[in-house]
Image: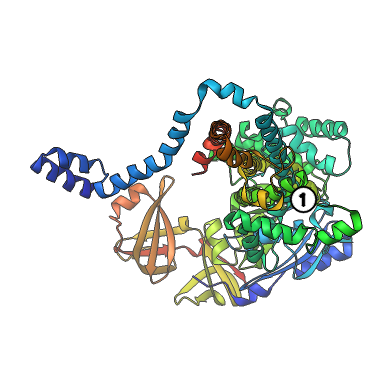
């Protein structure tokens, strides 16, 4: 598959940022530069009030650093940070109108849920009674009325997550940051909490930025995704746009597509990886070609009557079960992933090292310009 | 490990002797004998103290005004020294654990120094600093008319000097083990760094502070060398229990034993109080 091209690493959100800067002074406008030895984070972010943006990327991409920089917990070494028109670069974290939901929530273990939520308002100058009244209101709004008196260790994962959200919202932030908000939850709770969180984020009127490595969380929770790799923005757009037109191997893997880079000439794309692919789109110049693993058909013998235009001789490099399907990793003519049913895999007698012919119909491929 | 055990068991079955069976319990004689001697070395003196305690005259001894005076002074001074250590030692521990500054390693070493310094040397050093001609003491004397050596305040200072490092080390360790991100979370909620410390960190490390305070208190209660050097040995003013014990031993051994018993009881109480914590802390 193609390596992510340098050009993409350098392509940032400058265009989007400019559009926002002209039309919407409110919201977040930031270019976060943090130098940390060999690692450099350089991410531009523009988010309108009411919008939920997810920073999506692999571990070590710099997402959490970006989040900490927004909160003021990690100092910027360059760039800018403006929220609702106000410069925040040098504002200490306690003075920023920013609320954070930390990955493991960091609820104060010695305080009840109510006092955890009241902590923020209290720091902002409310009396104890006022702060508690506000906290009770937030807990009520998040459906935690019955758990107000509970210490964090008595709360379930989902409840703790909502208390953390209530605590962050109780300071009435203009920027809400969520660090891997669902990562600490087990699969079942996660489904439920994800739906709730989506509702609460939709109600939130200011800027929300969440950080996640889970594409599903990102796509369900966010209006827009910003994909970060190696400290840079490699792609951004709506979830459906990113799912349809991935631009790096990482994103292609996340959304489950085979992705290649090549040079198009009419209906033929000569891949950088070697062979050519026939597509329905008629393009010229550098393009991406993507197709889902389910579009690949495997044969033990070279197919003769097949109408598929794309035919490669491959070798099975690995097999794994994927739900009720088998995912075959193929190497050889073209490195690709193919999905097939368990029955088909048995009939083909697939095993690592087996030689197969892979075909993909042109109509199943999708080519788009780089 | 399993294979070694099996070999051992096999040899054991082959030879079958009782000697082999003892080896299988894992305590070789060259270690067992010195270990038992070591145990006896530590325990026999304590037993001797109990054996020789004049139990019949004990109530009388303990209620004598001299003993009562020394005990009262000891408890007051040790408690004050602990209080002083808490007020200045906890912030110092926080500084060492949470703030990066050049020379932090050196500062930590200096803080630990009184732990290993002979207390008498500590007393001499205190005299050089706070004595009437000391580098700080001469100003205290000429400006404020304050004299510290050979006063009850001097006892508190000497005890705090020796005991505070125990508290600082204990609290710093607890602080290092505590997740600093709680402080960060507090800051994002609008708390200043001091508020975060007061309302979040302090409650979280309270058990560590309590343990450190008990440790410091016990050390202050037993303090002898620095106290007698810096504060002298004036009954009712600077003569604490350890000093009284030492003095009594020469004139009235029974009183010395009675006093020692009191200090032993206090030590055991402290140990019992800290045991759970030390066990769980490994």
Q: Is residue A80 left or right of residue B245?
A: right
Residue wearing tag 1: B187
Write the residue at 83% across / 65% down. Answer: A19
Residue A306 lies in what quarter of the image?
A: bottom left
Query: In the rendered view, does B131 fall on the left or right side of B223?
Result: right
Farthest residue, direction front: B251
Q: Position of residue B45 (x, y in %)?
A: 44, 38
Q: Quadrant of residue B264?
A: top right
Residue A139, percent from left and from top:
76, 32
A86, above or below A145, in the image: below
Judge whether B78 appears above or below A76 on screen: above
Judge whether B33 appears above or below B62 on screen: below
Q: Position of residue A53 (x, y in %)?
A: 72, 54
Residue A341: horizontal and vertical position, in percent? 38, 49
Chain designation of label 1: B
- From this view, report whether residue A288 is shown above or below residue B181: below
- Please tell me which residue lies in front, B53 or A292: B53
Image point (52%, 75%), residue name: A268
Colour theme: rainbow
Label 1 CA crowd tier, 10 Å (few <14, some 14–19, many 20+): many
For label 1, the SS is: helix
- Occupied quadrant, residue B156: top right
> Across the whole image, how many numbered discs are drawn on residues?
1
Examine the rendering and report whether any part of residue A284 can be seen: no
Q: Work out whether residue B142 or residue A132 is closer to the camera in this orientation and state it.
A: B142
Closer-to-camera residue (A234/B270): B270
């Amino acid at each position: 598959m193609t390596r992510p091209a340098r050009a993409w690493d350098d392509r940032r959100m400058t265009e989007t940022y400019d559009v926002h800067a002209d039309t919407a002074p409110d919201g977040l406008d930031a270019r976060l530069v943090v130098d940390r030895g060999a690692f450099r984070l350089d991410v531009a972010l523009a988010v309108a009030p009411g919008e939920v943006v997810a920073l999506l990327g692999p571990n070590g991409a710099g997402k959490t650093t970006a989040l900490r920089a927004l909160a003021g917990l990690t100092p910027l070494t360059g760039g800018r940070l403006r929220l609702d028109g106000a410069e925040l670069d040098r504002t200490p974290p306690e003075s920023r109108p920013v609320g954070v939901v930390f990955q493991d929530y960091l609820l104060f273990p010695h305080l009840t849920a109510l006092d955890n939520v009241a902590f923020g308002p209290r720091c902002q100058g409310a009396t104890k009674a006022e702060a508690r009244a506000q906290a009770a209101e937030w807990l009520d709004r998040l459906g935690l009325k019955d758990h107000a008196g509970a210490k964090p260790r008595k709360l379930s994962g989902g409840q703790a997550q909502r208390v953390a959200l209530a605590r962050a919202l109780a300071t009435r932030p203009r920027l809400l940051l969520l660090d891997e908000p669902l990562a600490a939850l087990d699969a079942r709770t996660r489904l439920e909490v994800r739906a709730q969180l989506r509702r609460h984020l939709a109600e939130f009127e200011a800027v929300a930025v969440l950080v996640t490595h889970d594409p599903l969380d990102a796509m369900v929770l966010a209006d827009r995704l910003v994909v970060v790799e190696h400290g840079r923005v490699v792609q951004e757009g709506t979830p459906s746009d990113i799912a349809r037109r991935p631009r790096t191997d990482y994103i292609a893997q996340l959304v489950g597509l085979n992705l290649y880079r090549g040079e198009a000439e009419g209906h033929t794309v000569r891949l950088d990886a070697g062979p050519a692919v026939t597509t329905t789109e008629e393009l010229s110049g550098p393009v991406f070609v993507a197709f889902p693993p389910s579009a690949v058909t495997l044969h033990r013998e070279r197919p003769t009557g097949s109408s598929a235009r794309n035919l490669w001789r491959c070798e099975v490099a690995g097999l794994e079960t994927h739900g009720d399907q088998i995912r075959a990793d193929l190497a050889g003519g073209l490195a690709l992933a193919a999905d097939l049913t368990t029955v088909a895999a048995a009939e083909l007698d697939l095993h690592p090292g087996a030689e197969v012919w892979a075909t993909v119909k042109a109509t199943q491929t999708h080519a788009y310009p780089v | 490990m399993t294979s070694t055990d099996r070999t051992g068991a096999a040899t054991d079955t082959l030879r079958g002797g009782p000697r082999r069976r003892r080896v299988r319990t894992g305590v070789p004689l060259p270690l067992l004998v010195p270990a038992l001697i070591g145990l006896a070395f530590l325990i026999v003196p304590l037993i001797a103290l109990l054996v020789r305690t004049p139990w019949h005259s004990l109530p009388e001894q303990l209620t004598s005004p001299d003993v009562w005076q020394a005990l009262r002074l000891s408890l007051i001074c040790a408690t004050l020294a602990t209080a002083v250590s808490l007020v200045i030692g906890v912030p110092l521990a926080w500084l060492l654990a949470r703030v990066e500054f050049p020379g932090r390693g050196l500062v930590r070493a200096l803080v630990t120094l009184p732990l290993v310094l002979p207390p008498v040397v500590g007393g001499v050093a205190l005299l050089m600093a706070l004595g009437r001609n000391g580098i700080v003491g001469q100003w205290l004397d000429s400006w404020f008319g304050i004299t510290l050596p050979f006063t009850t305040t001097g006892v508190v200072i000497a005890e705090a000097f020796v005991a505070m490092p125990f508290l600082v080390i204990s609290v710093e360790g607890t602080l290092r083990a505590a997740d600093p991100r709680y402080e960060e979370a507090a800051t994002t909620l609008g708390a200043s760094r001091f508020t975060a410390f007061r309302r979040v960190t302090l409650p979280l490390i309270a058990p560590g502070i309590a343990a450190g305070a008990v440790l410091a208190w016990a050390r202050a209660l037993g303090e002898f060398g620095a106290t007698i050097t810096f504060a002298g040995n004036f009954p009712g003013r600077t003569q604490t229990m350890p000093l009284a014990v030492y003095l009594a031993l020469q004139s009235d051994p029974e009183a010395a034993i009675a006093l020692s018993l009191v200090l032993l009881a206090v030590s055991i109480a402290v140990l019992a109080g800290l045991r759970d914590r030390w066990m769980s802390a490994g």
